[in-house]
Amino acid sequence: MRFPEFKGEWKEAPLTKYLEFKNGLNTDSKKFGKGVKFISIMDILNNQYITYDNIIGLVNVDIEIQKRYEVNYGDILFQRSSETIEDIGRANVYLDNKPAIFGGFVIRGKKIGNYYPEFFKYLLSSPTARKKVIVKGAGSQHYNIGQEGLSSILLHFPPLQEQNKIAQFLCLLDHRIATQNKIIEKYESLIKGIGNKLFSLKMRFKTNDGNDFPSWKTKSFENIGKTFSGLSGKAKEDFGIGKPYIQYKQVFDSPQIQIQNCGLVNVSDSENQNNVKYGDVFFTVSSETPDEIGMSSVLLDEVDEMYLNSFCFGYRLSSFEVLSPLYASYFFRDSSFRNKVVKIAQGSTRYNISKSELIKLEISLPSIEEQARIASFLSAVDEKIKNEKEILNLYLIQKSYLLRQMFI
């Protein structure tokens, strides 16, 4: 795919024709938190392009160090290290006249050739370029790419005018993607804010005839359900084939289990493993930070045979007339409940919660009719978020297609 006004072949060249590579700064951890702007891997991954104002990190270094590790307009920054080979060497471009410096897990490609900076960023994210970068990665449990590997990569470059046209076109699509992300963030902020008001009784619905719903009643976990464990006695070779099971990430990522994301585990008929079913609530039991402990998700699908991973436990309601599963999916993610869970987290370098401590907690619940009203409202906003994410996905598919078709 090409704009019709351009003819002629693109010229193949090594990255060293355009970039001079250098590894980033490693320094004492005590120097971070103040000083000059410091570009990290997260700045490369989390921004459409890098500017002085969207850099998060700061580091306190002298003038000589700043000069040695300075990043200027048009320089390309590469991710030097990654946990997966697919993410090695991801790149972004610095588009600001205020100089910054770059960190030890980053490789700077200093601009020494004549190229259009935004085009270079899109070129490096194209499937062709990514394949050439990935094969230069090395490692087993952790993957790295070096200056030598990047220097040996050959890519095709069009004339500057065509570079500019391609970059402007793709920038328009990126701006639309950024706008779509902001729309989603707006709705996610809305559902979080309204949910918090509803669960803290700062906002309440009325009955259909305009009357108040009954007062909320305090219930203990012990009296409205019971806990059960996830898979036990499984080895690495048991996974990848067999029956569906709910993975840790499914519980952590979403308040409602997305069963299409289940993994597979080999469970024989003679094993005594706990099956999950509609309405079950799952809690994560371990986390690196107390704020992420006890994340919950609810199964809202009828399933025949499905299991739960061993790093979570389940909670089965005694009656849906006391607590609605749909309501539970929102309530257990709200800060009013999350704050209680964080308080029972135990640990120092890693945090855990126990089933016995969780079921001692008390919660305040509205009538089942008010639960239905709250859940219905929040579900409608959730559906809007889902629709907006589907639109975003279409834009991302379109961008992926263009990156395949517009670059050699």
Image (cartoon, rainbow, N blue to C red):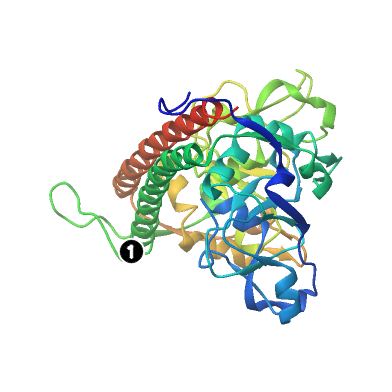
Residue shown at 75% from the left, 70% from the top: 68
Residue 184, position in %: x, y? 39, 47
Residue 231 seen from this side: no
Give the farthest residue toward the left: 209
| Label 1 Cα neighbours within 10 Å, binned few <14 / some 14-19 / many ≥20 | few
Residue shown at 77% from the left, 74% from the top: 29
Q: Secondary structure at mark 1?
A: loop
Judged left or right of residue 372, residue 274 is: right
Residue 167 seen from this side: yes
Q: Amino acid at mark 1?
A: Leu
Residue 274, position in %: x, y? 68, 32
Q: In this view of the protein, which residue sits in the foreground, 398 or 284?
A: 398
Residue 217, position in %: x, y? 39, 59
Query: Which quadrant, please, contains the C terminus?
Result: top right
Q: In this view of the protein, which residue sits in the foreground, 294 or 228?
A: 294
Q: Which residue is mark 1?
A: 201
Q: In this view of the protein, which residue sits in the foreground, 139 or 280?
A: 139
Q: In this view of the protein, which residue sits in the foreground, 195 or 125?
A: 125
Judged left or right of residue 308, residue 187 is: left
Give the farthest residue toward the front: 8
Residue shown at 73% from the left, 37% from the top: 133
When the figure is inspected, residue 119 is found, relative to residue 242, above or below; the finding is below
Report which quarter residue 303 is drawn in: top right
When the figure is inspected, residue 70 is found, relative to residue 300, above or below; the finding is below
Residue 174, position in %: x, y? 44, 43
| Number of numbered callouts drawn | 1
